[in-house]
Image (spheres, rainbow, N blue to C red):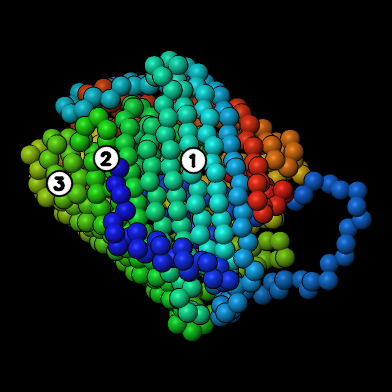
Amino acid sequence: MTILSRACACTAVALVLATAVPVAAQSAQQPPPTQTPPAAQPPAEQPPPPRRPTKRKPRTSKRQPTSSSGRGSFDEARASRDGGPSRQEVVILGNVMGGYDDNLTAGLGTGGGTAPTAMASGTMAMLNGTLGYLYGNSLRSIRLDATGTLTAYPGYLDDPAGGGIVNFDARTNAGRDTTLSFSERVGYEPFFSAYSQGAGGAPLPPGTGPGGTVPAASLFERRSWSSGTSLSLDRRWGSSVGTLLGYAYRRQEFTEDDYGDSASHSVNAGYRHRLGTGLRARADYRYQALDYTDSATTNRPTHNHRIEAGPEWETQLSRRRSLSLSLAAGAGYIDTDASATRPAYDAWVPMGSARLRLTLSPTAYVESEYRRDFSLFQGVTDEVYTTGTAYVRTGGMLTSRFHLMLGATYSNWQTPLPSGVNDTMNIYGATTQVRFLLSENVAATLGYYYYHHRYSNPGALPEGFPAAYDRNAVRFGFTVWIPLVGASAAQPLTQR
């Protein structure tokens, strides 16, 4: 387990002390991972659903309707010096889930290296709980979340596997136009999957990856400690220009052996320029230095650069509907040193992304994204792949109690061989999830999840790793949300 450096600890203490003054902020969002997965599932950003029907006579609103002229969220006026009154919240969120996994494998790999074990089909059970604390207002805030998990696969594991994650976020305004953010994450991961954000980044069906309702069921069991520290400085230069500078350090260490251990430093810089109402241009650059232990237990340093630029557009279609579109194009450069089993590698790769989100009502949305990038397939082949990934997702409250979410993902991975032929992997995922609110604090959830991948060259895979894999999973359970201090009893479970 990695312990915070003295410098990071000092920064964290300074930010905590800053929140003690009577000006404090809404909770900062957790920064993205250092190595952006090409198919990381986006959070559900839908606004709260309507409250349950009431017999009380509705009040007439005196607010003026929102203008539909197309004003976007980044057209806001200069930040106020007064963050308003501070608030304090303590909440508990718990999930109890059970279900069945049907896992089919074929064409096991014949290569050398660590041999994973294919997961057996059978029943599963999962219990997790999160204790969350928030203090702050719109200028300064701190958030601390601690999550514990216990997962059982009777046909696969002899004993239930436990794990835990602690997240700390702090944010403070350093002047009227500057925001300083700090984040720390430490976790013990009970399962390591090659198809999770901790490794190559290929997609699981929405809702089954890290942070989703259901934890990812691994192809093979590997337990690891991981930590991540990040610091960012966001600056507004007047009403039209903004800049962002950031640094992050990530580390992952496996408990059984050194294969797949990694540590990385990354630096990023961003520029935003408002061009008009609801329209702005952006440009981003990121550099990463990664040290990775490959299948021959040899340290293999990797360096990569990414640069992208493009427009972002937002418009308010009506009082309840809005549309946002983001486009970006650029290039990435990656080079890796030679190891005992792999030659040195360097290449330029075209990059780009497109993201669309349509908000249909306060509780209904449709969003889709495509991204072209590159990634290492850590823990499986150690090769560098160009990746193209797309997802589509929709959800909303069908009634005051019933919530529906549908999603699908696709990803294509390719890596060149000396023969001139590419190794390829195609991945598909889909999910259907329904949630019924039994009360303001309890919801019942039912979900179906599908995952499928095919790798073109089984001989390039570690022994026992399937070139063809299909997974069908069904989950049913209950979610409980308990506000202890300060939180509203109407907190929507549909966002969890």
Q: CA distance from mark 3 to mark 2?
A: 15 Å
Amino acid marked by disc 3: Arg
461 lies above or below 263: above
Disc 3 + disc 1, Cβ < 8 Å: no
- Disc 3 or disc 2, which is closer to the eye? 2
Residue that extends furthest to the left in the rendered view of this protein: 340
Label located before the other in sequence (1 or 2): 1
Answer few, some or many: residues within 10 Å of disc 3's Cα (few below 14, many 20 plus, some between 14 and 19): many
Q: Position of residue 418 (x, y in %)?
A: 12, 41
Residue 314 visible in this rendered orientation of the protein: no
Residue 218 visible in this rendered orientation of the protein: yes
User: Would residue 440 be found to the left or right of residue 194 on screen?
Assistant: right
Residue shown at the point (43%, 69%) measured from the top left: 180
Specify the label residue 232 is tagged with. none
Residue shown at the point (23%, 41%) measured from the top left: 261
Amino acid marked by disc 1: Thr
Q: Secondary structure at mark 3?
A: strand
Answer few, some or many: residues within 10 Å of disc 1's Cα (few below 14, many 20 plus, some between 14 and 19): some
Residue shown at the point (38%, 21%) measured from the top left: 119
Q: Position of residue 266 (x, y in %)?
A: 28, 59
Label located before the other in sequence (3 or 1): 1
Q: Which residue is mark 1?
A: 147
Specify the label residue 253 is tagged with. 2
Q: Which image quarter is the N terminus in?
A: top left
User: Would residue 66 be found to the left or right of residue 312 on screen?
Assistant: right
Specify the label residue 300 is tagged with. 3
Q: CA distance from mark 1 to mark 2?
A: 20 Å
Q: CA distance from mark 3 to mark 1?
A: 33 Å
Q: Position of residue 412 (x, y in %)?
A: 35, 42
